[in-house]
Image (cartoon, coloured by chain):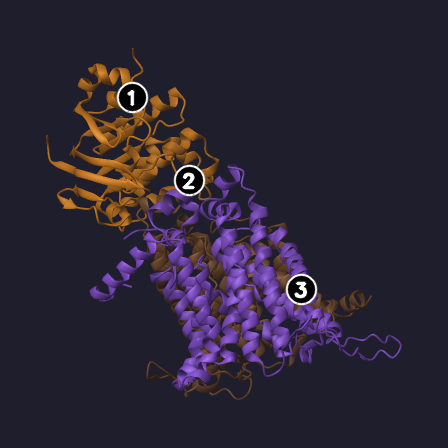
Chain colours: A purple, B orange, C brown
Amino acid sequence: MAGTAPGLKAVRGSIRRWIDGHRPWSTLLLYGALLVLAVILPLLPSWFALPTWFERIVSGSALGRVALFALFALGLNVVVGFAGLLDLGYVAFWAIGAYAAAIGTGAARFSLDYRSGRAVGVAAPGWHMWMWLLLAGAIFIAVIAGVLLGSPTLRLRGDYLAIVTLGFGEIVRLTANNLDTVTGGPQGITSIPHPAIHVASVNIVWGVLTDVKYYWLLLFFVVLWAVAISALNRSRIGRAWVAIREDEVAAAAMGVPVIRMKLAAFAIGACTAGVAGVIYAEQVNFINPPTFDILQSILILSMVVIGGMGSIPGAILGASVVVLLPELFREFDEYRFLVFGVALVVVMAFRPQGLWPSKRRALELKGGLAEEMLRGKEETVGSESA
Amino acid sequence: MTEVVLEVENLHVRYGGIEAVKGISLAVGEGEIVTLIGGNGAGKTTTLKTISGVKRPESGQIRFRGQPIQSKAAHEIVALGVCQVPEGRKIFPRMTVYENLEMGAYGRRDGAGFDEDFERVFALFPVLKERSEQPGGTLSGGEQQMLAIGRGLMSRPRLLMLDEPSLGLAPLLVERIYELLREIHRQGTTILLVEQNAHMALNLADRGYVLESGTIALEDRADALLGNDAVRRAYLGEE
Amino acid sequence: MRCANGLIDQFWAQTRNGITLGAIYAMIAIGYTMVYGVLQLINFAHSEVFMVATVVSLYAFRDWYGVTEPLTGGTLLLVLLITLIPAMIASGLTAVAIERLAYRPLRRRRAPRLSFLISAIGASLSIQYLFNLMDGNHSLLFIPLPNVLGAAPQEIPDVVSSKPLFSIFGTPWNGQQLLVIAVAVLMMIILDLLVRRTKLGRGIRAVAQDPETASLMGVSIDRIIVVTFLIGGAMAGAAGVLYSVRFHFTQWNIGFLPGIKAFTAAVLGGIGNIRGAMLGGLLLGMVEAYGVACTAPQWADVISFGVLVAVLMFRPTGILGERGVA
């Protein structure tokens, strides 16, 4: 932010000093205020007259997508930002969660009638309460998938891991496409039931026209995840991730169980995508393989990178930017992949720490001499100063 | 002193987070053999690498024949006639001996002097001629050192810088390498020699600098340093 | 059983298909392996370098030379030559541009490896969508983009007849298949000589084996890196022309699958190893072809990805082993 006016800089400086002097109260206050704002955002249009562009971005559907992708970005941030593993097949876990939901609710009408050989399917009444059980099931399945993919591959060098995960993502999508007896093939699965809560006198039902309710549901998970992940990051596991990022060999020598810690990051990322995948499937009622192509993985990656790798508020901010920019500028929609592609290159070249950086990670990502010292020649690529 | 070939003035270099060289000044005159001696981590190798352009200095000046070179890239410095024979020999293991020697002449454009230089190197190190089609990685340690020096000579350097040519070699081989260095010097090459083996280096050199934790602790004529009590205790292993 | 029967029935036909496909993979794989050799970096944007050449072929065959029916003899050779040259130049320059914009700033800063991968992904995505948007109806920063490709696939005219020329073991071969193999073999021989016999090749190998010492020998590392991207890009460019001759269409995202398969080939042969990339390409092409015979065509990509995952997991150093470019 080189071009900031000096006055603004002074104001920002004083705010920063105040925040630094009053941690953790100031932080809590800040996040509390942001949370309240996030909750009431979709209600604003009914309270005030707002410009249309603002109404567009606080509509339930736009916010719902922000929250959905924020959840994905939080999960991928654990993998990429905390553990430093580039996962290009993250969408696979989204697909696994979504298909788990679709099949688990019985919406996938794969043949139960073996004699006729025709898809008969089961009706899916009264499945609503199962949504919560499904969520647990999907987490379980996604974590299993994450561990299955991770345990053999996490020993690989970083760039190989990126390719393997990319291959894995494609395998999942192509399998969903080709295995039509289970997944419905290219036609996908339709009429996945919406979730509901019926406990005592509480009755909350999600449906087709309840975008705002879905937003709150997703927001709940975003907050839950943000809190849980940040606690995790401050724990011993988080410190192990730092050590692995800085020097894997040294970390292993100091007794950090490198593979297990990477696996943990992978599993957490997978279960996050699984949860988001379930809610996604139930919200849109319909899933098919093209949704889960590599571009989604890259889109989520750009959220993490633009927001700031290793930064939890960064991941949420990144998701908001990437989702809302096309919402603000409708014409922008066609250009978004071009713009976010360029953004990845530009951010890496000029602001590798992202928009809302984590202090620790910023130091590492800027690279330079300390890096050379810590990692030796192997980790830096083709260095010739001129 | 005759004409100054290399001049280093108040050189500071950081290596990682640490300041490895803290204000070194030295000079090498035409036709001299100058040695830098000192213990591990004294900053000898960093100094050489900075002169040859592999490392960037934090501050200070390096002049070669009066021309500042501290901001030039390594390959440009080689083209001016400064050649470093790196520590640990650094032979290209999957190239033949012949190709390794060709690499030494990489920056040169003149075709004619090429064959002449091969003859000169092969005359100095006949063993390299015998092995010229063998991959560099299959040579013994002593042969690799000879190849490294021969490769350095192929660039026709005006200043040959050697980093620990005796490292890891048996005493007899060290003697042999030093005889060859003397011969190379007699043929008219100026030499800057970095060594931990202070005894060998000071016996060969005209002048010497003693480096201690990034600064020059002593500088003198080589025979004077050989006679200096502090040097004898610290670097020549004498009580 | 279906598998065994399929294999027996189609063995020679699939061998032919495998070799043809493998030759194309091999040529793309060379770019991955050479860049890896000098930079220890996977150039994820390499698939776009390939794509650019298919677009050049589209223009060359369809517009510049107005090919409407398959050519033969001298005309064919001439048209191929004056298509290969601009295609290889365009691809080579694309590769160099990627190096300049996406990698060099990070190299200067000695950024961590993760940054390079992300930058590469970004470069790949932006090139793809730049071509996607170049349909004459879009503009960028108020500058109208030319009509180059657009979102829809474009048909490339047949330059070489697909009529069978002769049979081996009852399997017909046509000119397209022969041409792919002939050009690929020729290109690889030239490349092999270049790397092994020339001063430039020695420079590339020296940087791959030990960059610091290479620079002490007077090698400009930046220059070698640029040349490596240029050569690897040009090979992918030739592959793009061959692909166009064989498969007759192009699209903005056409690079993705051949790209990742070529990468698989490079790893299969031992990344950094040029002859390994050639061998790996051929092998992967065959595995894919036999796999298709064994299952069904829609599983071809799954098979390749399966090979990729298996190689990386069980033999990440490849068949010929990882080495510098040699």
Check the image and report above or below for A333 versus C45: below
Q: Which mark is residue A138?
A: 3
> Could you classify mark 2 by the number of other residues whose Cα lies within 10 Å: few (under 14), some (14-19), or many (20 or more)?
many
The residue depicted at 25 percent of the width and 36 percent of the height is: B21
Please tell me which residue lies in front, B217 or B205: B217
The answer to whether residue B60 is left or right of residue C259 is left
Residue A87 against residue A101 in the figure, above or below: above
Task: List the residue tagged with mark 1.
Answer: B200
Residue type at tag 2: Val
Q: List the residue tagged with mark 2.
A: B97
Mark 1 or 3: the one toward you: 3
Is residue B92 rendered to the left or right of residue A10? right
Number of the front mark, 1 or 2: 1
Q: Residues within 10 Å of mark 1 (few under 14, many from 20)?
A: some
> Which amino acid, mark 3?
Ala
The residues tagged by marks 1 and 2 sit, at their Cα atoms, a distance apart of 27 Å
Query: Quick one: SS at disc 1?
Result: helix
Please report the residue visible at 32 percent of the width from the left and 23 percent of the height from the top.
B197
Say which of A62 and B60 sits in front: A62
Identity, as a three-letter code, of the amino acid under mark 1:
Met
